[in-house]
Image (cartoon, rainbow, N blue to C red):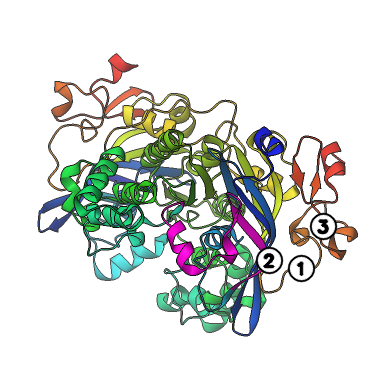
Amino acid sequence: MSEQSKNTTAPFLEVKDLAVEYYSGGKVIHAVNGVNLTLEKGKTLGLVGETGAGKTTIAKSILRILPDVGAKVANGQISLDGQNLLSLPEHEMRKIRGNKISMIFQDPMTALNPVQTVGDQIAEAVRLHNGGNKRQAEERAEEMLKMVGISADRYYEYPHQFSGGMKQRVVIAIALACNPDLLLADEPTTALDVTIQAQVLDLIAELRQKYNTAMLLITHDMGVVATTCDDVAVIYAGNIIEYGTKEQIFDHPTHPYTIGLFAAIPSMSEDEEWLHPIEGLPPDPAALPEGCAFHPRCPYATEECKKQPIAMQITKDGHQCRCCCMEQIAKGE
Amino acid sequence: MVPVIEVKGLKKYFPTPRGMLHAVDDVTLSIERGKTLGVVGESGCGKSTLGRTIIHLQESTGGQILLEGEDITHVRGKELRRARERMQIVFQDPYSSLDPRQTVDATIREPLVVSKRYKKSEIDEATAALMEYVGIDARLRMSYPHELDGGRRQRVGIARALALNPDFVVCDEPVSALDVSIQAQVLNLLKKLQQDRGLTYMFVTHDMSVVRHISDDICVMYLGQVVEKCPSKELFKNPLHPYTKALLSAIPSVDIHHPNKREILKGEITSPINPKPGCRFAARCPFATEACYQPQKQEEVATGHFVRCCRVHELG
């Protein structure tokens, strides 16, 4: 995507042809269907899509925390810094989790242990990965608390004594305590109010800049993407349907789904009597439609779209789009 | 014209072990027929409590509630039931606000049955008409909530609220659990219903772009009090209260070439338990002075534009 990736041989994070299946009630649910993405150090990639599109499943596959029973990586490769994560033995993977890769979960209310002080929860991660004695880990935990804007006096308090925004800051402190190379942020601000969201996004940006951390940001909020990301991947029914730089996606959305997604957001600058929803519903992942998964809702759908899976098309400047009618749509036909 | 809903000095306090929690404190507002009042603010500011107190899901602590000029603050028994038929609510969470053991049909029919005013044949007809009206396929009549997606469940909630032809509907974050593409479908439906039936809405939300789209007037709440109230367009063009300004600037803009100039607020919403008399925003306000810690009056700075801030003229 970026200049960097063209010059060096292997990108920092590379996901290739990833497919993940869940099994439930005798049915196979195709949650992720052949996702390809790359991410360089210090960059942020936004994964955008609706509920059930497979965003969180992609992040969980990278960290290998999919449930043992009922879920399977059916195909694909994930490599971080040249190392294939999917073939690592579990004890090696444990060293990577929380150390090289860490994750911020959506709901700070459930991500913390309610019967352990917040300070100890940060110190635990530090001791596990960096070793050192208890005192050193505690010092690091205090440092992290201060860094996320919480006074070190509150080290011995429990999560229930914190507000939602502060809990999310503790979760961020845990995730960043070991200076990870890759941060997976799964809707980190969705549960927060806008003024607190602004604080948390600023904090993440500041810390990332300091440590040159790469981030995969999962969100459904286009505004958050616009303020935070370098690149954007739009996901629909477990597949990336459009992929490009933030400028490419926001200035020239090409896939009918992306176009529809932007049109559905109530405008902050213009007055419109009616909104423009995307008609219909996202498909059932246990029974995906033939061909393009979006065709039942697509205003441009042709017979062609119903026949076979659509290949990703790449324009000269690296903007990717999975649509066979994109040229006609671009011309406004 | 008599407003459909008028609220004067409404208070709702909750006793807690640490003192009195002032969830709604001295709120005065009115909504004309066919209009939508948006209520915005952050979690814990009392916006949902305000809606629920107005429609008598909770007893008010003080103040007055008028429904078409008639004082319903202390009505009980039969009169309360009559008042409730005219005031309904659509809840935030379409997953927990429907009875998991009732079919779509039974859920929508229930208010009609409970009112004891209709014959069975009339109820059958009305239920089918309501389902069609809110856009639920007739084949889903016997489905249970778990078989429906969020958008359809919310349509069931809307049909149930409209069953008795209310005058006033409180929409308590009705679209915040839905994806944008579905959110737009439901917002369009609410707007169409309002135009067809002359409904009056109080639309509670934390999403500024949604409230801008749907509201005629907006009031901004902070810690139980209305800090600013004015027509929707005016609020976005000319916000006056420092909190409103900060709130608007915090919204991440989808325009990547003109990002919002963000004013990052320090600190978080303070506790609503036993609040001090002054401006409740003073502790986080970058412009706070001594005077802000005295009780604040609501002032009409322009026609229909009310602000509760003693420094509003200086700050401009």
Q: How crowded is mark 2: few (under 14 residues within 10 Å), some or many (20 or more)?
A: some
For this view, does A283 lie left or right of residue A317?
A: left
Could you give the CA–CA distance between mark 2 and mark 1, rounded to whole angstroms?
7 Å
Magenta-span inclusion, residue A74: yes
Label 2 lies in what chain? A
Q: How crowded is mark 3: few (under 14 residues within 10 Å), some or many (20 or more)?
A: some
Q: In this view, does B300 lie above or below A304?
A: above
Q: Is mark 3 on a helix, strand or loop?
A: loop
Quick one: label 2 or label 1, which is nearer the N terminus? 2
Same chain, marks 1 and 3? yes
Give the residue number, with chain letter if any, for mark 2. A283
Q: Residue furthest top?
A: B314
Give the residue number, with chain letter if any, for mark 1. A289
Q: Residue at x 29, y 33 (%)?
A: B266
Q: Is mark 2 on a helix, strand or loop?
A: loop
* Closer to the camera in the image, B293 or A307: A307
Type of the residue with mark 2: Pro
Type of the residue with mark 3: Ile
Label 3 lies in what chain? A
Q: What element carries label 1?
A: loop
* Closer to the camera in the image, B314 or A190: A190
Answer whether residue B130 is visible to the viewer in this image.
Answer: yes
Same chain, marks 3 and 2? yes
Give the residue number, with chain letter if any, for mark 3. A310
Can you tell which quarter of the image residue B85 is in? bottom left
Q: Find out whether the residues at labels 2 and 1 contact each other: C-beta distance under 8 Å.
A: yes
Q: In this view, does B13 lie above or below A331?
A: below
Type of the residue with mark 1: Pro
For this view, does B82 lie left or right of residue B260?
A: left
Q: Residue B223 carries which label?
A: none
Provide residue B248's location: percent of width, then percent of height. Answer: 43, 32
For this view, does A66 lie left or right of residue B181?
A: left
